[in-house]
Image (spheres, grey):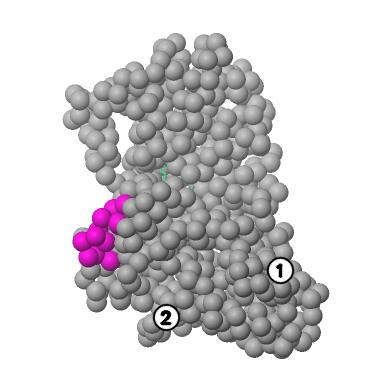
Amino acid sequence: MQKLLNEITNPEALRLLNQKDLPQLAQELREFIINIVATKEGHLGASLGVVELTIALHYVFNTPEDLLIWDVGHQAYGHKILTGRKDLFHTNRQIGGLSGFPNRSESPYDAFGVGHASTSISAALGMAIASKIKGDFKKQHIAVIGDASIAGGMAFEGLNHAGVTDANVLVILNDNAIGIDPSVGALKMYLTNVKKGTQKRNNIIKALNFDYSGPIDGHDIDAIISELKRLKKVKGPKFLHVITTKGKGLKQAEENQVTYHAPGKFDASTGDILSKTPSEFTKFQDVFGLTLLELAQHNKNIVGITPAMPTGSSLKYMMDAMPDRAFDVGIAEQHAVTLAAGMATQGLIPFCNIYSTFLQRAYDQVIHDVALQNLPVIFCLDRAGLVGEDGATHHGVFDLSYLNCIPNLIVFAPRNEIELRNIMYTAQLGLNQPIAIRYPRGRGFIAHWKQPFNTIEIGKAVQLKTGHKAAVLSIGAIAKNVSDAIDRLGNPSDMAHYDMRFVKPLDETLLHDIFKTYQTIFTIEDNAVKGGFGSSILEFAAKNNYKNTLNVLGIPDQFIEHGSVTELQKTIGLDVEGLAKLFSKHM
Ligand SMILES: Cc1ncc(C[n+]2csc(CCOP(=O)(O)OP(=O)(O)O)c2C)c(N)n1
Ligand SMILES: CC(=O)[C@@H](O)[C@H](O)COP(=O)(O)O
Ligand SMILES: [Mg+2]
């Protein structure tokens, strides 16, 4: 029974509550989050950990006038529920429903759109400076940032700037000593020492000119409220260090914080994760992780790098087996890329695994530190294409475009697990240039993917199917939808299908054949249509004066929201049925 929570339709109603009732509200809010996430899925541990902090923030500050920014935003479920979205919360992360992250178009209480880590301090500082310029000295600007996210470069840059301003900004460090995987690095050690009381002097936050307070117990609502009230009156940059437990209130989530970061469906009363229907297929991530380990066992120069995603990327297999050769560098994509570049100068073979969406952070490093020096770094871009429920902030739909224009870089997309294995094998044999290998989130299509290795010839495409009337050129794992769509045609033998494999270099010899053979050509990619694979084919056609009918399909020039991958593909015509319909129109 959510007696108190049911009355809280917005934070104004919350502020009318008696402070002594807030622990009861915290309990109800936790239960509400657990009940919905248990069936609808989503991020769990982070939101459970900040229930008291969330209530205290909205109780003390005058949101939405005061601006509250949640770093990453995966911990903001309580915030959403208290700010008028309780009745819609069951639609969280579903198509047409609430976004899993704060989003300015969703609510005036979401002061800044988030999803990628370490942005909150810069954004809050920007808002605080804007308020000052506008002569508003009452407004508060608050960034809540986790212990893993504060180690990201941008967060340091924000602190460094804020410390020399008199901007009215409050940074709250929500320190639960874990990211998705355990936090890493010297800063984590520093924070541990602060908590143990062994780091009383040389406070690095004070040294950056912040009014520092804490650490305080982030589950003690009265303590947080009293400190927030004090800080509200302090001018200039302030920093509050709060200690919380990720997963607080659900035993399993507290004990197994990595799994319960985003546990999938679970039993709300017991906390036990519900078993999924077993699949004969393996995740691309595990194919990557297990293949890398296998290769590293034979090639001593191989090293692995992940910025804070050892479990998600499956680099953990190598980290467990070879801790000296596999590195979790924390939320530090830029560092990860240049670290790989440095290693490559010394003859190591770095497999730098970064989610496609997060590599956007390290674009200059890819160009300036890797490609310009032609260093043979092997980028493995995980979560390429549509990722599903995480939505617009996380879809990996720009990589082919942003990599396509970089000289020296090979760009490859495996259509299945065996191709992923073989390109990893080929790359570690020794390329004289960098390569980016992009593959999707989730399971592949081949049960027996662990086949003996074969070398892939760089720049060589393959024909998957012959045809009489038209040709489809696909890149990457979307090939599966294309094959299934062709199978549904009245006359499948009309359509030829080529897996082009490489966006760079293109297999121009084969392309000439294709353009001379088929009047109608489709290009299909799960990347933005602008600047990606299809654009390269259009350029090829223009350069060679081909006048064929070209249909370029991919992610349209808009941000795609959240929903299951299949649903999202349907909305943009990349699903099997949509492709089949389109093909048949041209037959
Ligand atoms: C730039 C970037 N890299 C990686 C991620 C993936 N990611 C999401 S949450 C998270 C861990 C955040 O940990 P922390 O800041 O401590 O917050 P907590 O989950 O503990 O509340 C990571 C690595 C991301 N969102 N953005
Ligand atoms: C909040 C965040 O950025 C991550 O938790 C992300 O949701 C991970 O996505 P995967 O589930 O695809 O690893
Ligand atoms: Mg944390």
Check the picture and name the quadrant holding the C terminus: bottom right
Q: Position of residue 383 (x, y in %)?
A: 50, 60
Is residue 312 visible in this depiction of the protein? no
Q: Position of residue 13 (x, y in %)?
A: 64, 22
Whether the magenta-drawn stretch holds residue 339 is answered as yes
What kind of secondary structure does the magenta stretch mostly adopt?
helix
- What residue span does the magenta drawing correspond to? 338-349
Count all numbered tags in the image, as a single digit.
2
Task: Compare residues 112 and 363 and report the one nearer the observer.
Answer: 363
Task: Compare residues 229 and 354 and report the one nearer the observer.
Answer: 354
Q: Is mark 2 within 8 Å of ligand 2?
A: no
Ligand 1 placement by image quarter:
top left
Amino acid type indicated by mark 2: Ile
Vertical order, 507 against 221 (above or below):
below
Q: Quadrant of residue 117?
A: top left
Asked if residue 341 lies left or right of residue 355, the reply is: left
Asked if residue 505 lies left or right of residue 300, the reply is: right
Label 2 crowd (10 A; few <14 / some 14-19 / many >=20)? some
Vertical order, 483 against 132 (above or below):
below
Query: Do the CB atoms of the residues marked 2 and 1 lie less than 8 Å apart?
Result: no
Asked if residue 457 lies left or right of residue 135, the reply is: left
Q: Residue at x 43, y 38 (%)?
A: 118
Which mark, residue 456?
A: 2
Q: Name the residue beneath numbered marker 1.
A: 551
Q: Residue at x 23, y 68 (%)?
A: 301
Helix or strand or loop: what does disc 2 sit on?
A: loop
Q: Position of residue 539 (x, y in %)?
A: 60, 66
Q: Residue furthest right?
A: 585
Vertical order, 13 against 86 (above or below):
above
Asked if residue 94 lies left or right of residue 410, the reply is: right
- Along the polypeptide, which appears first: circle 2 or circle 1? 2
